[in-house]
């Protein structure tokens, strides 16, 4: 890469990657319901996320799962999208620790790209 300009001021002015030129395209979920409840081999409950798409890459997901009756947080985490794996998995399963049979839970998930652009919130209410 060759920097254009003979002074620091000229180089800075000609530098291509500025805030004004940063990517502003947010990731998007491509299915109507990108979240679902699944059971693992041991009978545990997990939240399955259908991976979102982005013009460059989805970096991570912000995942919040709460108990629907009390509002208590069950999961509050950032989960990497596994962008470093090829091929990238189509889905991610997030365990719901301590899920109680018959209880209702509310999951909210946001896809975030490397520039911090965020998708719409996907949500799902489910029972164990």
Image (spheres, helix red, strand yellow):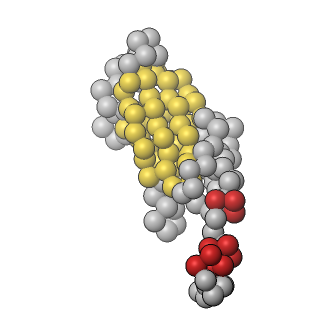
Q: Is residue 55 visible?
A: no
Q: Nearer the viewer, residue 115 or 70?
A: 115
Q: Residue at x 44, y 29 (%)?
A: 65
Q: Is residue 67 visible?
A: yes
Q: Nearer the viewer, residue 3 or 43?
A: 3
The answer to whether 63 is drawn above or below residue 115 in the figure is above
Looking at the picture, how far across and down is residue 128, in whole percent?
Answer: 42, 24
Whether residue 113 sits left or right of residue 31 in the image: it is left
The answer to whether 59 is drawn above or below residue 35 in the figure is below
Whether residue 21 sits left or right of residue 112 in the image: it is right
Looking at the picture, how far across and down is residue 101, in whole percent?
Answer: 36, 19
Looking at the picture, how far across and down is residue 23, in whole percent?
Answer: 66, 59
The answer to whether 57 is drawn above or below residue 44 in the figure is below
Q: Residue at x 57, y 56 (%)?
A: 115
Residue farthest toward the top in the current orientation of the protein? 69
Q: Residue at x 69, y 59 (%)?
A: 20
């Amino acid at each position: 890469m060759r920097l254009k300009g003979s002074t620091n001021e000229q180089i800075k002015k000609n530098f291509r990657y500025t805030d004004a030129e940063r990517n502003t395209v947010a990731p998007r979920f491509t299915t109507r319901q990108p979240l679902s409840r699944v059971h693992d081999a041991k009978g545990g409950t997990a939240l399955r996320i259908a991976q979102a798409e982005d013009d460059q890459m989805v970096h991570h997901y912000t995942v919040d799962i709460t108990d629907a009756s009390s509002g208590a947080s069950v999961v509050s985490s950032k989960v990497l999208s596994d962008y470093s794996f090829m091929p990238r998995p189509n889905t991610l399963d997030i365990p719901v620790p301590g899920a109680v049979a018959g209880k209702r839970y509310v999951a909210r998930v946001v896809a975030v790209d490397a520039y911090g652009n965020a998708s719409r919130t996907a949500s799902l209410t489910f029972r164990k």
